[in-house]
Amino acid sequence: MTSNGTSLPARSKAGDQAKPLNRADEVDDLLKAVQSLIVPFVRAADEDAATKPSGHGLAIPGGGPRTAILEHHKPEKLVNLLSFDLPSEGTGKEGLLAAVQQVLKYSVNTWDQGFLDKLYSSTNAVGIVSELLLATLNTNVHVFQVSPALSVIEKTTAKTFANLFGFNGTHAGGISVQGGSASNTTSIVIARNTLYPDSKTAGNGKYNFVLFTSEHGHYSLEKAAQMLGLGTDNVVSVPIDSQGRLIPSELSNLVQKAKDEGKTPFYVNATAGTTVLGSYDPFKEISEICKKHSLWFHVDGSWGGPAIFSAKHKHKLAGVELADSLAVNPHKMMGVPITCSFLLGPDITKFHKANTLPAGYLFHENASDEVWDLADLTLQCGRRGDSLKLALAWIYYGSSCFEQQIDHAFSIASYFAEQISKKKDFVLVSENPPPCLQVCFYYAKEGRLGSKKENTRFTSEIVQRLIPVGFMIDYAPGDKGSFFRVVVNRDTRQGTVDGLILAIEDVGKGL
């Protein structure tokens, strides 16, 4: 027994009658107790939505600068407020619920309309169900033997997803991976091992590998280069145009330059929805260059890839079907729980050949082209069943509802950019309409920007002052100093962005 009477697992001794298990009852009890805390947390965000058009969040009594979205404190103060420690003796249900209350109180409520900060937002009711189911199963989707249903679901979901992007061959499909960065890293390994098979055993030694990405490509490419022994100096940054898109002619010149210097170009990363401006690179032109030089063509669609569900916006992905691999994160635009990321491709037998290693004690179901022990396709062995999160959402909503949600988000981004362009105290940085769901702009009185340093100070101060009134947004560096980057999502309302504009104007006047 714990100090408050909670049962601990029964221990059998020789000759003793084992006590009956009561795990189901314990689960039932804790789920009901925690549900009584979680549901009000979500409901607070729903109730707060009505206040957002006024430029303010719903204040919650109890001290501190607190609205439904967050009770905000600096790290040092939060350490004292939480007083978090791990006891030597368990505190049972009472201690658990107290900890859950603290976590909810001092965490960002991503269900709140004011959370416009990152390239993701809250999940939904189905997301909570999927996480609960995965926790209940608590299995590893590394071999079919211990995860039969989840393995079939992952292969089916990945293949159906891949088909949407035009990967329709016999071996089209993909794997779930632990985030977009991991998807990109895995694609580099597959590219190197496929194009230069001897590097799989001999390493990079005799090659001076070079890979290419745009100036606005994700930083995970450089991280991957460090991890894989390629070195960040060999990640070549390709210039972009005024809309933030990779310039194909510059890529062509840089590839040839690398060859002339005796280096070994092997991989090009294009982006579908860049992190700051949301730009989509010209995939068809990039593919032609890759084919000419026998380079692996990867598309990082971690952010903008789900636009494929929309008849209105999938044209932005024209040419993506020419890629050798594609990263997509349903946990971003689609509201699937974090993490849920896929690496898709036209031929996953290449994934297998590049990543497989003999492990007779583990892999038993990969005797043919059809790989069922899914960890033999990936860099990791331990694998959570993340694909189930997308699968259950797809079952619940269907492709048509995904399309409606994505179209709504794009329409809100377009509306927001248009409103910003009309305001005399704002300077729009994004295109109008923006290519994806983030809207970038400066606050500048009468539209007159100051120095780079002053613009950055204004932006960062306003971001911090918005939190106590119920909005969280982010900012990014630009040529004229840091500007706001506001990311709308499938649930964002028109009144919310109207209220954000009011809030920025109100806060900005005091600077």
Image (tube, rainbow, N blue to C red):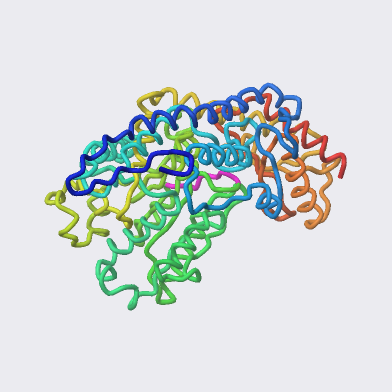
| Location of residue 302 in the rendering, given as x and y in whole percent from the top left corner | 46, 45
Residue stretch in magenta: 277-283
Q: Foreground: 322 or 332?
A: 332
| Location of residue 49 in the rendering, given as x and y in whole percent from the top left corner | 65, 24
Locate the N terminus by quadrant: top left
Q: From the viewer's perspective, tell me whether residue 54 is left or right of residue 127.
A: right
Which secondary structure is most common in the magenta stretch?
Answer: loop
Q: Residue at x 48, y 44 (%)?
A: 3
Q: Residue at x 14, y 52 (%)?
A: 364
Q: From the viewer's perspective, tell me whether residue 34 is left or right of residue 439.
A: left
Q: Quadrant of residue 442?
A: top right
Q: Foreground: 106 or 196?
A: 106
Q: Residue furthest left?
A: 367
Locate the C terminus by quadrant: top right
| Location of residue 455 in the rendering, given as x and y in whole percent from the top left corner | 79, 51
Q: Foreground: 499 or 261?
A: 499
